Image (cartoon, grey):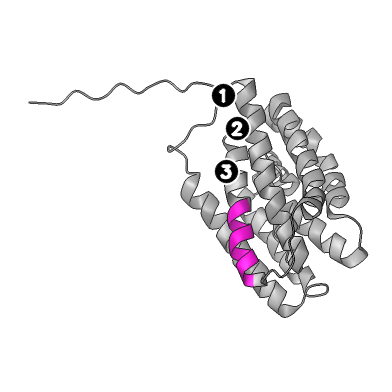
Amino acid sequence: MKTAMPIPTPAVPHNLIEDVLAILTGTLLVSLGVAMFNQVGLFTGGTAGLAFLIHYATGYSFGVVFFLLNIPFYWLAWKRMGWKFTLKTFCSVALVSVLSGLHPKLIQLSSLTPFYVALLGGSLMGVGFIVLFRHQASLGGINILSLYLQDKHGIRAGKLQMGMDVCIVLASFMVVPPMAMLASILGAVVLNLAIMLNHRPGRYMAV
């Protein structure tokens, strides 16, 4: 006797309150990870990684640099993903820019161990990214550029993103000590592992 196949439940779109709470939660997690990385001199990939390198090299605020670096990418986000994604991304970037500088004033972040920060901070950022992705928001200008160039010119987004991250790692030799660089690589692995294991196509459809 054959068992009837279950009827799939239609996806219910997130409402405005859910999106607002998710963006607040995701940016709180990401910005706390960023603040911890900043405290011990670590860096990460993507636009945040580039902002870290400029911050370490010049002394300019990470939040200001991160916010400014993302500005040119909003036009691409608008063209490729629409105004809702662009607005959510703008709000997310602005919140991370502000909160990453606010955390050290509200909590004590002294006596942190780089490799522990890599594990904890990388996990926090990874979970934060997942929350934002599932509500159709982003933090990565470079990621938007990669997707745009893939659509327009057939350049594989994953390869371009990896190439840019490799360039950021190589540039870090000039401003980051070797041990901090090793811890940063561990943090990047933890961050991407969290996303890879928990944000797969078919497991969760963001609407």
Q: Quadrant of the C terminus?
A: top right
How many residues crowd mark 3 within 10 Å: few (<14), some (14–19), many (20+)?
Answer: some
Query: Tag 3, which secondary structure?
Result: helix
Residue at image position (77%, 35%) is 90
**Residue 104 on the magenta span:** no
Amino acid residing under circle 1: His
Magenta part of the chain: 115-124
Per the image, the residue denoted by label 1 is 14
For the residues labelled 3 and 2, say whether their Cβ atoms are less than 8 Å apart: no
How many residues crowd mark 2 within 10 Å: few (<14), some (14–19), many (20+)?
Answer: many
Residue at image position (84%, 40%) is 71
Per the image, the residue denoted by label 2 is 135
Per the image, the residue denoted by label 3 is 130
- The earlier-in-sequence mark between 1 and 3 is 1
For the residues labelled 2 and 1, say whether their Cβ atoms are less than 8 Å apart: yes
Q: Distance between the residues labelled 2 and 1?
A: 7 Å
Amino acid residing under circle 2: His
Q: Which of 201 and 18 is in front in this view?
A: 18
Task: Single out the residue that lies furthest toward the bottom.
Answer: 178
For the residues labelled 1 and 3, say whether their Cβ atoms are less than 8 Å apart: no
Rendered position, 152 above or below 109: above
- The earlier-in-sequence mark between 3 and 2 is 3
Q: Quadrant of residue 163?
A: bottom right
Q: Nearer the viewer, residue 135 or 202?
A: 135
- The earlier-in-sequence mark between 2 and 1 is 1
| Residue 30 visible in the current orientation | yes
Query: Tag 1, which secondary structure?
Result: loop
